[in-house]
Image: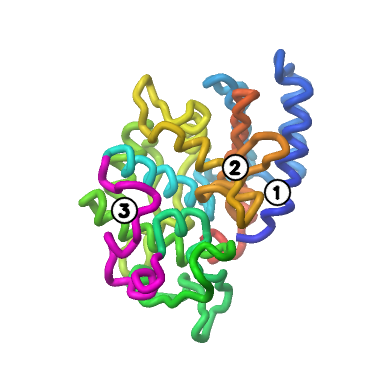
Amino acid sequence: MGGQHSFIFVISILFAFFHSGLAQTLDTSQLREVQQFSQETGADGILLVHRGNIIHEWYNPDCDSVYMNTASAVKSWTSVVIGRLIAEGNIESINTPVCDIIPEWEAGCKNGVTIEHLLTMTSGIKKRTSRSGPKRFVFMEEDFNDFVFNIELDTTPGAVWSYSNEAVQLLAPIIERASGMETEAAFKALLYDPLGMDSTSLFRDPSGNAVVFGGAKTTLRDFSRIGLLMINEGNWNGKQFLPEGWVTNATKAIPQNPYYGYLWWVDQANGSFTSMGDFGQLCIVYPQEELIYLRYQTCRNNDPSKNL
């Protein structure tokens, strides 16, 4: 995923706007300004949720789809599913060695990679962008899971942060083994159905494996439910769906990157956290303001591989 720093800047601009006017209320002119800003940055749809209620929704009338490709924003959902599996007792903790669940990944076993390493992009697998050669991107493969089972480490786990789709895809077989369900079925049982997300599905590779690092299909309203779960500290309709303290830890900057948590982008300056993908697919959560801002851009996307 590219352009993350530019969108951190966008997040800061939006925070300054909301913080100046939302403590009391947002009037119609302010909402128009937010919509105009979103349109000027290429959005095809936006949604604003304040204190659990939709206060503004807009879609580009020239765009023929209300569905969005999440691109890398789905990574944050994967973090939530791991949290659910820990809450259900299917995974002991983030400190669990991946070798306990997927012993087929020999490099992970030899080097003591943990669930936390995969959640924080510190597994030792560096970012890959090549379409050929030994360091090629996972998207070029037929079977994503088989590919990541054979991937080698580039650095010592925990030493550095590097944005790796391959590292996140390793969480797919972990979710399958821990839940006893195929990945999409696990997402449905642990996330979609409890939250009422009825218009969402994961992308699949050519071999049929569900992809957990990018490309999911959803709507702004479905996506907003992830934001609501997080803004309520993992509580949904009175039930604690995520472990106590999970949201705080997941949205706290890690030592290796001041802008990253457990597959969530964080902005310590304003206390917000974001699920983010290429082309500005965004779900920004402002806990203190009890506000969620969502944005998608779909009609002007012209490189399918960027959606992953």
Which type of secondary structure does the marked residue at label 1 adopt? helix
Chain part drawn in magenta: 89-112
Q: Residues within 10 Å of mark 2 (few under 14, many from 20)?
A: many
| Image side of residue 180 versus residue 262, left or right | left
Residue indicated by mark 3: 175
**Residues at discs 1 and 2 in contact (Cβ within 8 Å):** yes
Where in the figure is residue 63, as x and y percent of width and height? 60, 45
**Residues at discs 1 and 3 in contact (Cβ within 8 Å):** no
Residue indicated by mark 2: 274
Which type of secondary structure does the marked residue at label 2 adopt? strand
The amino acid type of the residue labelled 1 equals Phe
Which type of secondary structure does the marked residue at label 3 adopt? helix
Query: Does the segment drawn in magenta span residue 96?
Result: yes
Residue indicated by mark 1: 7
The amino acid type of the residue labelled 3 equals Ile
The amino acid type of the residue labelled 2 equals Thr
Q: CA distance from mark 1 to mark 2?
A: 10 Å
Where in the figure is residue 51, as x and y percent of width and height? 56, 19
Q: Nearer the viewer, residue 185 or 261?
A: 261
Residue 72 visible at all: yes
Check the image and report above or below for 42 versus 126: above
Which residue appears farthest toward the top when viewing the image?
Answer: 24
Check the image and report above or below for 155 versus 235: below
Query: Does the segment drawn in magenta span residue 97?
Result: yes
Residue 203 visible at all: no
> Which residue lies at the image location 65% right of the left edge and 60% below the top edge?
2
> Which residue lies at the image location 31% right of the left edge and 65% below the top edge?
99
Check the image and report above or below for 136 versus 67: below
Q: Earlier in the sequence, mark 1 or mark 3?
A: 1
